[in-house]
Image (cartoon, grey):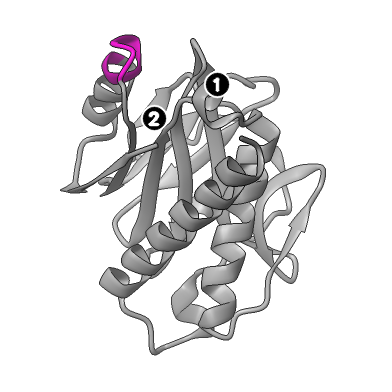
């Protein structure tokens, strides 16, 4: 299974979302991983129950990933996973586990010890969330993906209940390790994700 990796730089959330939907609609042969950052935006997934939209100047968008409301902004690494679950013999639950494991492996290399929560997907440092996961599956293909807070303005998260949890606090790599490098984080995390996907593929074929 060949995976194409694309570093898109800073992109419009809505434009990239439309491109993801178009991509999976065309039954692509190869899996793709898209790397990006977005200008400030709040997005709410398919679970809209009890979500309060903040009254701020930051735009908001209803989207088709799983989960509730979150925030994206510069300094937050976004990795979109456009993967054929059928060809990889993957369930969505297994993919979420691989994403969580990969982020945790990366952060441990940076001296950051993490944990996960069965009732709330993502990666945590003690009780604070450092990475979020939101996916959509259509015709065996996934799109959307993960966000890892690296060095961003976290204050917009104070205007929402991130992922539906009213008391959830957010954290980021720069709060725990000053010796970070975004380019290195991207390269390392992509390599870890690809390795873990490859291991799963080989064990299940």
Is residue 125 depicted above or below 52 in this figure? below
Label 1 residue SS: helix
- For the residue pair 61 and 189, the one nearer the viewer reads as 189
Left/right placement of residue 192 relative to residue 161 reads: left
The x and y percentages for residue 74 are 29, 56
* Residue annotated with mark 2: 60
The x and y percentages for residue 8 are 18, 45
User: Which residue is found at the position 69% from the left and 54% from the top?
Assistant: 168
Left/right placement of residue 89 relative to residue 186 reads: right
Q: How many marks?
A: 2
User: Which residue is found at the position 25% from the left and 46% from the top?
Assistant: 39
The x and y percentages for residue 85 are 54, 26
Please tell me whether mark 2 or mark 1 is closer to you in this view: 1
Tell me how far mark 2 sits from mark 1, CA to CA.
33 Å
- For the residue pair 161 and 16, the one nearer the viewer reads as 16
User: Which residue is found at the position 46% from the left and 50% from the top?
Assistant: 147
Give whichever of discs 2 and 1 has the lower sequence position: 2
Quadrant housing the C terminus: top right
Label 2 residue SS: strand
Quadrant housing the N terminus: top left
Res. 18 in view: yes
* Residue annotated with mark 1: 86
- For the residue pair 196 and 16, the one nearer the viewer reads as 196
Is residue 31 depicted above or below 107 in this figure? above
Is residue 172 depicted above or below 158 in this figure? below
| Magenta residues, start to end | 22-28
Q: Is residue 27 magenta?
A: yes
């Amino acid at each position: 299974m060949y995976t194409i990796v694309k570093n898109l730089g800073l992109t419009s959330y809505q434009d990239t979302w439309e491109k993801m939907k178009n991509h999976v609609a065309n039954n692509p042969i190869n899996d793709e991983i898209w790397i990006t950052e977005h200008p400030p935006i709040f997005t709410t997934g398919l679970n809209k129950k009890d979500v309060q939209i903040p009254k701020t100047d930051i735009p908001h968008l209803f989207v088709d990933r799983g989960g509730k409301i979150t925030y994206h902004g510069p300094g937050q690494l976004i990795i979109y996973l456009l993967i054929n679950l059928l060809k990889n013999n993957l369930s969505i639950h297994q993919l979420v586990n691989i994403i969580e494991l990969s982020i945790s492996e990366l952060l441990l290399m940076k001296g950051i010890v993490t944990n996960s929560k069965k009732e709330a997907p993502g990666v945590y440092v003690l009780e604070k969330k450092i990475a979020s996961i939101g996916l959509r599956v259509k015709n065996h293909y996934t799109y959307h993906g993960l966000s890892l807070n690296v060095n961003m303005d976290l204050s917009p998260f104070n205007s929402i209940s991130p992922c539906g949890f009213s008391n959830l606090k957010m954290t980021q790599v720069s709060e725990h390790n000053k010796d970070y490098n975004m380019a290195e984080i991207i390269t390392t995390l992509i390599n870890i994700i690809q390795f873990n996907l490859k291991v799963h593929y080989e064990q299940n074929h």
